[in-house]
Amino acid sequence: MTIEFRDLTGPAIRDGVTRRSLLKAGLGISGAAGLLLAGSTAAYAGVEAATDLIITDYWPVPSRWPATHKLTITVIADLHAGGPNMGAARVVQVVDAANALGSDLIVVLGDFFATHKFITEVVPHEAWGAELGRLRAPLGVYAIFGNHDWWYDINGTRAGLRRAGIQSLENQALLIGRPRQKFWLAGLGDQIAYWIGPNKFRGVDDLPGTLRQVHTDDPVILLAHEPDIFPHVSDRVALTLSGHTHGGQVKLPLMPPLWVPSEYGARFAYGHIVENDRHMIVSGGLGTSVVPLRLGVPPEILRVRLGA
């Protein structure tokens, strides 16, 4: 396994082919990959998905976050445990790498197990849960659920987290932190939890209800699996952390990602996004969806540093 560290401060990707246009054309990521990846390129994409691991550092400076509140957050998103690229041994590596960062807080942003058609190693809920149960951070380990958890086995996912001793947040806000450096950690329910028709979904998210639980002036960090909620997030929230998009999962050099599972196309595909002084960081995640390939978007763990 190769572990690299990088510090991203550049702008997020803003342009590209939208998810909707690809769906209308009958192409998702599997179609795009089939058209573009062949031979050695496909083999490399498989190796990148299974062996690379990037530690990406972000240093956002949200106006709503006090400079005196020093906080480091390790972000694990879209684990999608299951071979060939995220077998049990690989999950062990991810947990070891996350613990080694020594952050104050660890958050896990949903989509815990693989659901694609090319699974070569099933990693049961008990197995990935046991590994995530080894995560340690002084301020705790918290999780939210993703769309794949809801679509394929939400009860099993809940049980896996309970056995791991990891608290899940679903439209809940908790006041945590050190004395005189408290903050609210809010976890949003999934926004596309139920499939109700072609390109139509119903969520279990309740952003207003979640933020109504915030009853002090302390800053707020919001965990939301899909980044599409961001236009509706008020500036009361200092920072939103999301996953889901895999950064497009397949991205050719000098081109925007070909497929992003978002109604906003590539606007929220990846990275540190600032709009109207509101901050969101979208992780490229770790696992894969639809096909077990990654190209140009290596698996990553985030380390977010807040405060001076």
Image: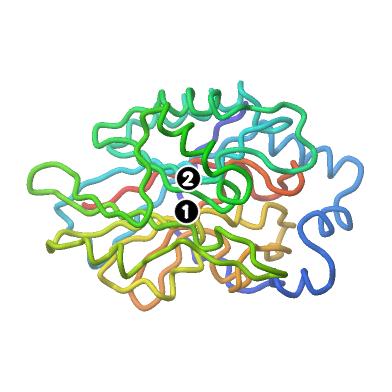
In front: 187, or 11? 187
Check disc 1 and give the amino acid type: Leu
Looking at the picture, how far across and down is residue 278, in whole percent?
Answer: 35, 71
Residue at 74% over, 49% down: 290
Residue at 12% over, 61% down: 216
Give the number of the disc on residue 8: 1
| SS for dot 2 | strand
| Residue placed under numbered mark 2 in the picture | 56
Q: Is residue 115 left or right of residue 236?
A: right
Residue at 82% over, 64% down: 27
Whichever of labels 2 and 1 marks the residue nearer the N terminus, that label is: 1
| SS for dot 1 | loop
Quadrant placement of the N terminus: top right
Q: Is residue 153 left or right of residue 19?
A: left
The part of the image, by quadrant, that contains residue 102 is top left
Looking at the picture, how far across and down is residue 67, in whole percent?
Answer: 18, 57
**Callout 2–callout 1 Cβ contact below 8 Å:** yes
- Above or below, 9 relative to 104: below
The part of the image, by quadrant, that contains residue 25 is bottom right
In front: 143, or 107? 143
Looking at the picture, how far across and down is residue 242, in whole percent?
Answer: 46, 56
Q: Residue furthest bottom?
A: 276
Q: Is residue 143 left or right of residue 40?
A: left
In three-dimensional space, the C-alpha distance between marks 2 and 1, rounded to whole angstroms, equals 7 Å
Check disc 2 and give the amino acid type: Thr
